[in-house]
Amino acid sequence: MTVITRFAPSPTGYLHIGGARTALFNWLYTKHMNGKFYLRIEDTDRQRSTESAVEAIYKGLEWLGLTFDGEPVMQFARADRHREVAYNLLQNGKAYKCFCTAEELEAMKAEATQRGVTPRYNGLWREKDPALAPKDAPFVIRLKCPQEGETVVQDLVQGEVRVFNKHLDDMVLLRSDGNPTYMLSVVVDDHDMGITHVIRGDDHLTNTFRQIQIYEAAGWNAPIFSHIPLIHGPDGAKLSKRHGALGVEAYKDMGYLPEALRNYLMRLGWSHGNEEIISTEQAIEWFDVKNIGRSPSRIDFSKLDNLNGHYIREADNKRLVNDVLDFVKKEVPETQKTWLLAGMDGLKQRAKTLVDLSENAKFYLHQGPIEPEGEKAKSVLSEDSLKLAREIANYIANLAPWTSATDLESATKAHTESLGLKMGAFAQTLRVLLTGKTISPPLFEVIIVLGKEEFMLRVGN
């Protein structure tokens, strides 16, 4: 059997980070099983579905590197097929027309509430002859659900889960305006797309019981289900807007690398021993939904930051140059790009996000004298310290050749010691003159990267 999975978001907003993890788990399992991974846009809610949200889903998946097979399936465009199945079920006695008015349904709800039971449709038209309804009266089509026994889900994550059928009422398949319901559309689409495995959040588990009943009524085999726990905020509550950025695009804007976010999301609920840093290739080899835990995971930004820092340090320098330039949205001359590339090894050691990296790299994206940042940096530039720093700078400028930061530093250290000076007497002043900050990559590395001409220009000699 070829494993076929799908990611089926509703385009009513950004690609939620929980949805991104669901897509990732589907993608990883499919790759692990050499199967097919499809994308279906569940846009049946026409009032809330937007083109911008659809585009955000595409961009989010693309940025995360989660490619899907074939063309996306748009659920609303398949409404005729969904209606066809509803009428087939009606014709085969598996569904029926319900002519209940809104007032009757409200009365059922009130009566159930008064009795202290869960409101549910009482099957008023289940066995009634449709001919008894008023002429041209509007109707819905309801599934004739089993009233005895149990519906059972053999879930790869949750284990065996059961519900008594008496607790499930006859769900609506087709509304009175002829539009199919979500429950029907999902089942028909999954069947027609040949979906073998459904991996989704455990908030869909209740839906699964109802959807299995549609599969059985249609005479179709249901897919294998895996319901994964939701992601919670740092406080243990269900993830919500108050916990901060939720959309994939927001994490991109916060300076996270896609491979770091993939690794982090993968470890939210899934594990392989004590491994924390797992490449995508290794994840594909190891991933199995049976290793997903049943407990919700808490998002931890400090862990994500540390993981992202690792991936920044491991990243190709040319790629990081492009990432920084994209991040700062700034056109710079080739000279500054050359400095940025040459200095990237020193810059990326202290960065946890592209925000950090871009901030640390600002002095390479600048030409000429640079303003000190903050009072601490300004306090370093006293008249005496500037005079000494410029004298030492003249000595450094006359050293030859400028090929190694280590050699440059050793020669300067020997010279200053002969004068009875320590490096601390001038190094911090030079650092501020060159970078505008009191913290930077190693001083002589910065000097070598900038070159003699820029070095002297910034020092003011």
Image (spheres, helix red, strand yellow):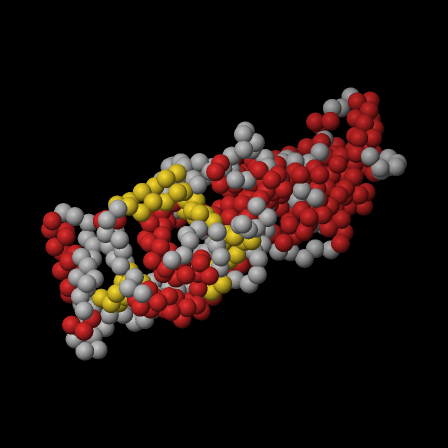
411 or 229, which lies in front? 229
| Whether residue 244 can be seen here | no
Which residue occupies the extreme bottom position in the image?
A: 135
Where is residue 149 drawn, in percent x and y? 26, 46
249 or 100, which lies in front? 100
Where is residue 142 drawn, in percent x and y? 27, 62
Which residue: 34% across, 41% down? 161
Which residue: 59% across, 42% down? 284
Which residue: 79% across, 26% down? 413
228 or 327, which lies in front? 228
Where is residue 293 drawn, in percent x and y? 44, 36
Give the left or right position of residue 124, taking residue 76 as reference: left
Give the left or right position of residue 46, taking residue 263 as reference: left
Give the left or right position of residue 338, taking residue 138 as reference: right
Give the left or right position of residue 345, taking residue 46 as reference: right
356 or 143, which lies in front? 143
Q: Count the marks.
A: 0
Where is residue 213 drawn, in percent x and y? 33, 54
Q: Quadrant of the C terminus?
A: top right
Which residue occupies the extreme right position in the image?
A: 400
Which residue: 62% across, 56% down? 329
| Whether residue 209 can be seen here | yes
